Image (cartoon, helix red, strand yellow):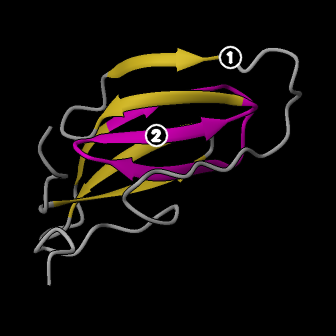
Amino acid sequence: MGGLPRDLAWVGIGGSVIALDVATGGERWRTRLKRGSAMVVLAADGDRLLATAAGELFCLDASTGRILWRNRLRGLGMGVATVLTPFGPVGTLPPPDGGRA
């Protein structure tokens, strides 16, 4: 499993995840997760993004935005879910040296 593309930044908003080119700010891709969900929480896991929206968890390919899998987290409600990965807190990227310094 590789790392995240260094030429993209990701925004979770309005039930969607949007990838932006860090050099230009232009949109590279947009993936709709859930209608009616205002808040999307993102976490990085290798070359994938984990995103929560309206009580569901989604795994996306960070380069393309393709949904790889989803878990409806049945029976847990519609609240805001948080995600933890071995790579650190939600919304952080591992250091360029992979934390080996």
Q: Is residue 37 above or below residue 58?
A: below
Which of marks 2 and 1 precedes in the sequence? 2
Q: Is residue 94 left or right of residue 10?
A: left
User: Which region shows up in magenta?
Assistant: 30-55
Assess whether residue 93 is covered by the magenta stretch.
no
Check disc 1 and report its element: helix, strand or loop: loop
In the image, residue 65 lies at what x, y percent? 30, 32
Q: Residue at x 25, y 46 (%)?
A: 46
Q: Residue at x 43, y 29 (%)?
A: 59
- Residue furthest to the front: 100
In the image, residue 35 lies at what x, y percent? 68, 26
Q: Is residue 33 above or below residue 89?
A: above
Q: Residue at x 30, y 23 (%)?
A: 66
- Residue furthest to the bottom: 101
Mark number, residue 50 = 2
Check disc 2 and report its element: helix, strand or loop: strand
**Is residue 84 or residue 51 the one in the foreground?**
84
Mark 1 touching mark 2, by CB under 8 A?
Answer: no
Q: Residues within 10 Å of mark 1 (few under 14, many from 20)?
A: some
Which part of the image, by quadrant, shows the C terminus?
A: bottom left
Q: Is residue 93 left or right of residue 31?
A: left
In the image, residue 38 lies at what x, y percent? 72, 45
Which part of the image, by quadrant, shows the N terminus?
A: top left
Question: Which residue lies under the disc numbered 1?
Answer: 72
Label 1 amino acid?
Answer: Arg
Distance from Cα at disc 1 to Cα at disc 2: 13 Å
Mark number, residue 83 = none
Q: Residue at x 22, y 57 (%)?
A: 26
Q: Is residue 61 left or right of residue 3?
A: right
Q: Residues within 10 Å of mark 2 (few under 14, many from 20)?
A: many
Q: Is residue 78 left or right of residue 12?
A: right
Label 2 amino acid?
Answer: Leu
